[in-house]
Amino acid sequence: MSPERVFELLERVRSGALDPKAAVAELGNLPFEDLGYARVDHHRALRQGLPEVILGQGKTAEQIVGIARSLLAAGQNVLVTRLAPEAAPAVLAALPELEHDALARTALALQTPPPLVPGGKVAVVTAGTSDLPVAEEALVTLRAAGVPAERVYDVGVAGLHRLLDRVKALREARALIVVAGMEGALPSVIGGLVAAPVVAVPTSTGYGAAFEGLTALLGMLTSCASGVTVVNIDNGFGAAMAVLRLVRAPTSETP
Amino acid sequence: MSPERVFELLERVRSGALDPKAAVAELGNLPFEDLGYARVDHHRALRQGLPEVILGQGKTAEQIVGIARSLLAAGQNVLVTRLAPEAAPAVLAALPELEHDALARTALALQTPPPLVPGGKVAVVTAGTSDLPVAEEALVTLRAAGVPAERVYDVGVAGLHRLLDRVKALREARALIVVAGMEGALPSVIGGLVAAPVVAVPTSTGYGAAFEGLTALLGMLTSCASGVTVVNIDNGFGAAMAVLRLVRAPTSETP
Amino acid sequence: MSPERVFELLERVRSGALDPKAAVAELGNLPFEDLGYARVDHHRALRQGLPEVILGQGKTAEQIVGIARSLLAAGQNVLVTRLAPEAAPAVLAALPELEHDALARTALALQTPPPLVPGGKVAVVTAGTSDLPVAEEALVTLRAAGVPAERVYDVGVAGLHRLLDRVKALREARALIVVAGMEGALPSVIGGLVAAPVVAVPTSTGYGAAFEGLTALLGMLTSCASGVTVVNIDNGFGAAMAVLRLVRAPTSETP
Amino acid sequence: MSPERVFELLERVRSGALDPKAAVAELGNLPFEDLGYARVDHHRALRQGLPEVILGQGKTAEQIVGIARSLLAAGQNVLVTRLAPEAAPAVLAALPELEHDALARTALALQTPPPLVPGGKVAVVTAGTSDLPVAEEALVTLRAAGVPAERVYDVGVAGLHRLLDRVKALREARALIVVAGMEGALPSVIGGLVAAPVVAVPTSTGYGAAFEGLTALLGMLTSCASGVTVVNIDNGFGAAMAVLRLVRAPTSETP
Amino acid sequence: MSPERVFELLERVRSGALDPKAAVAELGNLPFEDLGYARVDHHRALRQGLPEVILGQGKTAEQIVGIARSLLAAGQNVLVTRLAPEAAPAVLAALPELEHDALARTALALQTPPPLVPGGKVAVVTAGTSDLPVAEEALVTLRAAGVPAERVYDVGVAGLHRLLDRVKALREARALIVVAGMEGALPSVIGGLVAAPVVAVPTSTGYGAAFEGLTALLGMLTSCASGVTVVNIDNGFGAAMAVLRLVRAPTSETP
Amino acid sequence: MSPERVFELLERVRSGALDPKAAVAELGNLPFEDLGYARVDHHRALRQGLPEVILGQGKTAEQIVGIARSLLAAGQNVLVTRLAPEAAPAVLAALPELEHDALARTALALQTPPPLVPGGKVAVVTAGTSDLPVAEEALVTLRAAGVPAERVYDVGVAGLHRLLDRVKALREARALIVVAGMEGALPSVIGGLVAAPVVAVPTSTGYGAAFEGLTALLGMLTSCASGVTVVNIDNGFGAAMAVLRLVRAPTSETP
Amino acid sequence: MSPERVFELLERVRSGALDPKAAVAELGNLPFEDLGYARVDHHRALRQGLPEVILGQGKTAEQIVGIARSLLAAGQNVLVTRLAPEAAPAVLAALPELEHDALARTALALQTPPPLVPGGKVAVVTAGTSDLPVAEEALVTLRAAGVPAERVYDVGVAGLHRLLDRVKALREARALIVVAGMEGALPSVIGGLVAAPVVAVPTSTGYGAAFEGLTALLGMLTSCASGVTVVNIDNGFGAAMAVLRLVRAPTSETP
Amino acid sequence: MSPERVFELLERVRSGALDPKAAVAELGNLPFEDLGYARVDHHRALRQGLPEVILGQGKTAEQIVGIARSLLAAGQNVLVTRLAPEAAPAVLAALPELEHDALARTALALQTPPPLVPGGKVAVVTAGTSDLPVAEEALVTLRAAGVPAERVYDVGVAGLHRLLDRVKALREARALIVVAGMEGALPSVIGGLVAAPVVAVPTSTGYGAAFEGLTALLGMLTSCASGVTVVNIDNGFGAAMAVLRLVRAPTSETP
């Protein structure tokens, strides 16, 4: 049972639309599976059209396998992010249905392919080659959610002509995920070129004063292009989720 | 002439849809007014349906008046943000058509009221009373752009019952701007309650380890609710612009 | 001889309650065992009802074994914390009486089981799976001190319904240790739900702007729930000790 | 209605102890007074035995007066903290029933004196004269909550003899609030001298490398005395609230 | 006597080109004027073709006047930088020969106009209006040194078309001083457009995550355009001096 | 096609010097080779007289080899910087024409030796032995660009006599790259001794308060010698590129 | 009674050299005067040959006057440091026996002139004019303690010849206090020139990347001249006290 | 030839005490041995009575061996500090005359034992076991310089009685090196107990908010005990050198 459902229930009780008894009955049926180290929610995936996501970082291979197995057994799609190279072999050996993407550090099992989200493509843009792992994590997440996307790679601002060469793709996108490290200037330039939503993702590439992505993060937050939003350093998954919130938004209005 | 126009022109030349001569003619007509300290773009407002925005901070009252006067003379709407209390009297005396909002630190002149943006309300949410100036800046900006909005104030996470009392308004919003200082936890809780886009704005309220908004900023960036995006500290204007990008997005697809 | 004893002695001399000669005699009997690299205090454990604690970090396996052996020989209970995976085999091989907890990174020998501390359970709460090692360190420490505790795991604020599901356990606890990484918002929400003491422990989980626990630490320090206190990043042991100070406090008043 | 009440209600409904209808009736009566900029909770004070607390910082004098007036009209006690010298005259002129403490930067009105909390005194300890405002804020808060307290002032660690002179008072306290700036070493020394709970409060005194309290804060968090907990810089109020949680704790067990 | 002279002397003694006696005689004639709070070097200006520069910040009006008067009496040109608005009236009243530039915060007296440095113009570029004071400080310094310069103002990267409009001026410059605050992206874009030396100056404009210029500074240091160099935040004077080193360099080769 | 060419083209169209048709034709011929993970520009090297540079950090050995092979096949010179010791064997095995410098962490292939840049030597100066890798990276880059250079090593400011011993070499240099870690004081002293351009490179040597080069970086930025410019920590390549901009500058004036 | 006395007493009791009764009697006579906000120690000055020092910062004028009056009444010398310009008039009006030094921000009353400390002069060295207040604070403190000192001012490392001109004074000093802001390089150079103790004092002069003295502080801590020690930013008083410890050291050995 | 010698020479020339010709002759005989990567000074050891010190960190084993061999061949004593465990075997195999101390990470060869420095012992004090490597580095350095020293270990402030037990040793020391990590409070307490010089050394022990020694460093710099000086984190060598400057100081006065 999602939080939305809990509060919706409560609202309906308050407005008189729902019999309190029925409400109480539902409250007793929370469909968690308690694994000791995690409490797995078997209904979320079905509700949101997104695979359940397991953040691999900070979990042992055993924990990842345990959670994924519980979800798969319930018929859900599963996405593992930040799957460390050390943990990957054990996880993949235990769960051969997972498709591994070493560059994106993800493992994905789509038991039920997601329906395609209409409304156009999302552009995933990178400044340089070392931003690829983060961009690919965003792409895998979008694919798992059924959102079509297009790569616009290696268009850093110091080579403005390469960016210029791809401006058509940028301007046709319904939303843009812009991935950059170093000084993180790319979202500022792109934010000035397009009217669509821009989600900026700083990456931890670079060295010295790049401070593992902090400089790119701060640069993006103070972007002179207004209306650019930012997610955590290297958080390609989070950027994709932010896009998912907005491409889904209209459908949530449908009666 | 906007950058979009420049590149669109170039594209049309490349595709053969436009005669190069005509393109060159247009390139010679950039409608800037050069004030010495600033180069004012008289066409942007008409194109984007948003008043021209003057960031008051870092400018003298004279500079603000000069830019605003140039824009007003061209028939545009004008929004001044971060208008310091010291600069406000001189600006308002020189330009009585500006409507001052002391709490939001804005001055606004809508010579042409913007058309109402359809699709539902945006919720502007605050954790506490001291977050109001930032929230009100977002509200003035949304109003200037014709986006309807609703206040959901004083619902900080330490008083979960107050938040609970407003959950209906939160869930009905098409997008949410969530303004909070201190530890910045509110977007995490709200991000878990709604499926719509959440733009988090950290504020510089608090003291000591709040570090003038840095703690709230970092907290929001590492939010455990996925898909929350973040703008700069105290940047109510930027949050409203981010929302504007997404509520406008569908209309940009129209042929 | 504890510092308390030294100053108590001095006080009794000053008040006339103790003969100075006797005081001086006691002062000559400090029961340290000097190992060169450490001066082991054989009386503290007996006085405080807690095993002597050896912080494993920063010590060689040889030093840990040396100190532990000295304490065990004196009949004391021993708790080793932050026992690095590299050092553990050598330590455990040398001292088979130690019980190792790999997740909590502790080794414990209870030669004299501690008496149970009355007054109810302490809740040890985590936001996510990767907070477990820190929570388990707190639990081992509480166990070593005879304080009963209950796990309330995986109740992060982005899934408010899971937290809601456990609110009874939270409200019945006499004190709560709340362990969270990322933005560290959990203590704010829990601090608003319960009246009992809340000790917040930031963890170094997360990446990027989590800055190895700094963000959670700052978030907890600026919690909008008043009266929440904080210990060092990943310091499950310290949180348990803080709880021990308060659950013991009443008994120290007994004549 | 407090959050505790909301969830308690819910729990009683779930366990069958409460008729759902009655619960729903109560849910419709949330006693907030909505002032626009704040939503005032008129029941909290009566429930918790503590005056409603208004954080003065970040609020205008008008907002402070508005909230305080609403609370006073409902018969509640009121405590204003961090009342800026600039705002104080207007607040005090509007509400003469408030008692101002300029050093502590508080204003207090106890319409119903709180009952005395039994169980002994709390020691409020300072390292130096410039820590006084923070310590006095803690003392006013404790007084407002009915907790007896004793000052132990000017006992910084560089003058160990002055600390030694007061060790009796320290050891008799049921809990200690230790306020210090600069390097913040006092809680480490006191934490080694007493077994009772120690809440450390860093202050923003000092200059240069004191970094406005950051150094004291970090020093207290890494204290070599185990079980010391820490609150935000200059947060005397928060330290008093933490103590209130623990001195109240036993009474919450009473059926 | 400059350090160059001292070491040159030494070199000539070592090579046998200079009689040691003569060298020693010169060493006894250091032409400092000791004002107590400063030791004024009367020969430097003549040697370097630059006015003596007095950093106004950190000096009292009296000290500034004292040093300037000593230099003027010796017939030198004088440039005061960072002349605080509070100190300016007293300084200007005492020394009416100084020409004040309130925007640049400079005061300049050119008793001997510097000869024009050949080789083309230096472009001084700004991203926005609030970068003007720093740019103007650079311009006054260049003027004092006889280096011709051209303003290219208000060409921030979020409005790429305005930058495009001035690309000719950028590409014709022999060196560029690029002044920008916020995320500091302008030098990256310009560094990719021109082959000439680019000296980037971060400014303390902006708010929140701009951290008073730190973000721009770090962004410039990690610029993806190679060969961009950086000076201190707001250091327009330093940027001009860096340019002076390179426009002078060829002449120092002349025998 | 370089950005310069794009804009030059545009300028010529605007001025009437170029037929728009011809311009459009050229625009269709961007000579990128798209490798998927990178878009290689085959013309840049020929234009700038510098090998194409591949930043090895953040790229896999496969990516480095792929880009380098594409460039070499097009007849270009190639410089790989920050080639990690782990990646080097695979890269060198695949491309035996690369000359490896383990200390500088570079790999270089000069298929067409660059013409010697006239105008004198550049001095590459270090404070200590541990600054060598960074200095050598600068030297390899200068060599690849045909700029003659001279080593002035191990002349840290605490041994002023060693610096004094080399002052002649310093003063004869047309530009200086000054590499130092720890407190980064060397550029300040050298900046006071010479009139030529000084590019300071902080290094990440040292420990503790050196903070991996941050201290040296900040020290160099606040150098009391005016006109010193700074590049990123350990960025020997960037310093060489900055020098290249200035030694090339005069030739760009030639008609 | 000083801590030394307390422990000395204790030692003598332990060794049998003192009768415990006598010791206890002494323990009852601690000569504090308790002013409520401070506990004034009337014996310290006589013991240490130094005036009692009152840190003015963080104290009200009333508190400063109260403490000073108590000390003066007991016949002691008094030194007030960091006396804010706002507080000075009230303090000086109340206590006309205080001699004010506005530059050093001190007030001093030497009722009993200190005996001259033998062994040579201490050099107080500054890099620039804005370091004077800190240097003068050190000088006033040394004078109050009877230590002869010599000023060596305005010898920053970018003008090595001015430093060279004063090398004799530097080398004759028995100890050196070296005061510098900006990059803080002066102690490194001086530390390499002299064998005597060097106490480095960073100052908060400078702007931007000087970070209010942090850069100088870090630079001095990582000085490449070994054996340089550092005190807090702007802490001229502390540097003088450090020197006092070492010039006194030999006399403390005398039986 | 040391810098002192160079300037002394210059002084003697200036005063007429030395014939310039003789001076020039000496200037031609700088006894460096240039190894390419380092310039070894063969006279310094003899002058200062200290072995030449090689900072092992940042140097390859080959470089360390090269420098050490050159020094040993010239008959000097050699001390290698921060000799990494990886580099040690190669260094020790090449130079069997080096005595390795694995805990202190040093290698020492005393070909000429240093004369004993008179005047009493230096106390090297630690707070805990993990501070030992740094303390031992100080001890090896003192031994290499002939300064007698005494260990006072494991006397952290949370166990005041252990400190009290060693107060005699502390008070008899002519100077104290106080090594502590975590909050770094020990120098504050000791600084209040003794009148002799106290050099504080922060260590990088601890975790979380200890920030690898930064917290201890800042705590020591803001110590409330006046006159405590500080060296870099983990810099036991530097602390010993600071002590060496002061124990040597009197002898430099001898005619």
Image (cartoon, coloured by chain):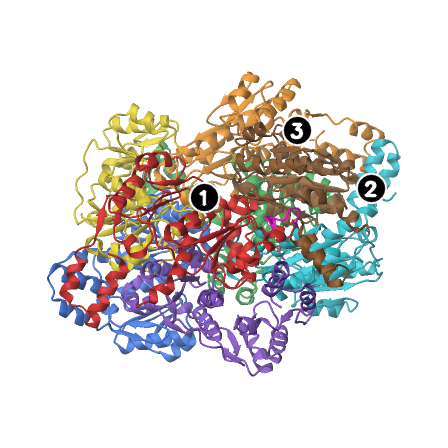
Chain colours: A cyan, B brown, C green, D orange, E red, F purple, G yellow, H blue
Q: Are marks 2 and 3 on the same chain?
A: no
Please report, as a chain letter, where disc 2 is located: A
Give how far across and how far down residue H176 sits, in percent: 31, 53
**Residue G26 seen in render:** yes
Give how far across and how far down residue A26 sits, in percent: 85, 42
User: Which residue position is annotated with label 1?
Assistant: D211
Q: Callout 2 environment at 10 Å: few (<14), some (14 to 19), or many (20+)?
A: some
Identify the secondary structure beneath mark 2.
Answer: helix
Q: Which residues are magenta?
A: A220-234
Q: Nearer the viewer, residue F76 or B29?
A: B29
Q: Could you tell me the amino acid type at mark 3?
A: Tyr
Q: Are marks 1 and 3 in contact (CB under 8 Å)?
A: no
Vertical order, D77 against A75 (above or below): above
Q: Find the distance from the CA under tag 1 to the CA under tag 2.
A: 50 Å
Give the quarter of the image for residue F94: bottom right
Vertical order, E42 against G48 (above or below): below
User: Which residue position is annotated with label 3?
Assistant: D37
Residue E39 as seen in the image, left or right of residue H83? left
Per the image, is G63 magenta?
no
Name of the residue lying farthest toward the front: F16
Give how far across and how far down residue D181 sits, in percent: 44, 39
Q: Could you tell me the amino acid type at mark 1?
A: Phe
Q: Find the distance from the CA under tag 2 to the CA under tag 3.
A: 35 Å
Q: Nearer the viewer, mark 2 or mark 3?
A: 3
Identify the secondary structure beneath mark 3.
Answer: loop
Per the image, is A227 magenta?
yes
User: Which residue position is annotated with label 2?
Assistant: A27
Q: Are marks 2 and 3 in contact (CB under 8 Å)?
A: no
Give how far across and how far down residue H162 sits, in percent: 39, 49
Q: Could you tell me the amino acid type at mark 2?
A: Leu
Query: What quarter of the picture does the C terminus of chain A occupy?
Result: top right
